[in-house]
Image: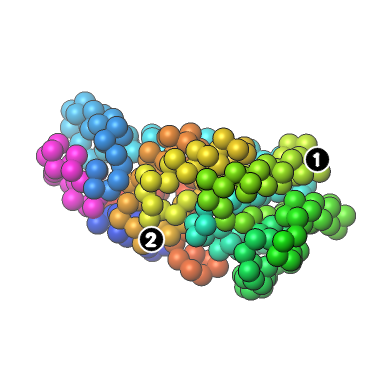
Amino acid sequence: MLSRWKKAVGKVAELFSRTKGASSDEMREILIEADIGVTYTDMILAAVAKAKHDRQQALKSEIVRLLTIPKPSESLTKPRIIMVSGVNGSGKTTTAAKLANLYRQTANVICACADTYRDAASEQLAVWAQRAGVEIVASQKGQDAAAVVFDTIAKAQVQKIDTVIIDTAGRLHTRTDLMEELKKIQRVITKLKSTGPDLNILTIDANLGQNSIQQAKVFTAAITINSLILTKFDGTAKGGAIIPICNELKLPVLYLGIGEGVGDIVEFEPHTFVEALFA
């Protein structure tokens, strides 16, 4: 597990390793370089300045505090429904497959291909689903995505399948028509399960850093996003942006994507994450 966390935080940890023994000005420079941003850097440094003895521990504690946001509670009613959304290229399909692989360890899983815009989207999800060892409800280009979701959930209800994972089409936040489609999918889910999606996840490419926040706000305004997954986290030095992302969106991070394999995902836990940053 430790090696997986080292992989997850590799590049950004190189920055944080320089905070030990650093002056306040040096620490500020490091935190801003990690893409934490001026507002949250000042907040962290204010907490560190109050520390009478161990400044490094004060730094860790403040970062943990900023990353500790309650995770959504899931309905007891089956099936568990997980909807995955995000902009083009944010790693939704890969993330959906990784989640399927995780959940199939303790439950039976079915995936819905609600990406009916992209050529061969259904085939791509089918390849990932095969790697994860789960069933898929495929779709055709141009098909009504909400209808695919309806059919998948209805099938899960009849066959007593525990978990439904919905891979939606990647969409630019500026495309009003595609954002309306997301709203329609959520309405369909709510008709079949009154509480709506248990996990309504937004995938964010960690390489975008704070630039992803405004995009994400369009999604959170359109549908009831309740959690985040940061993808490609192992390849970025902008990992500090996780702090403003969580706090500006007021949403918890559930997992970090750390590679291309179906098992390359780690559950996010603030204390473990921070210890790995400073290891």
Using residue 183 as the reference point, say whether residue 39 is left or right of it.
left
Mark 1: which secondary structure?
helix
Q: Is residue 14 magenta?
A: no
Q: According to the image, label 2 marks what residue? A: 234
Please tell me which residue is depicted at 73% across the width and 36% down the height of the picture.
Answer: 195
Quadrant of the rendered structure where residue 13 is?
bottom left
The one nearer the camera, 138 or 2, is 138
Q: Position of residue 25 (x, y in %)?
A: 13, 38
Q: Position of residue 52 (x, y in %)?
A: 18, 28
Q: Main secondary structure of the magenta part?
A: helix
Mark 2: which secondary structure?
helix
Q: Position of residue 219 (x, y in %)?
A: 55, 42
Q: Amino acid at mark 1?
A: Lys
Using residue 132 as the reference point, say whether residue 6 is left or right of it.
left
Q: Looking at the image, is mark 1 or mark 2 earlier in the sequence?
A: 1
Q: Is residue 27 magenta?
A: yes
Q: According to the image, label 1 marks what residue? A: 191
| Mark 1 burial class by Cα count in 10 Å: few <14, some 14-19, many 20+ | few
For the magenta stretch, what is the residue range? Answer: 15-31
Q: Amino acid at mark 2?
A: Asp
Residue 54 is labelled as: none
Quadrant of the rendered structure where residue 141 is?
bottom right
In 3D space, how far apart are the residues under numbered discs 1 and 2 (Cα atoms)? 38 Å
Check the image and report above or below for 8 versus 217: below
Q: Pick the quarter of the image with the N terminus.
A: bottom left
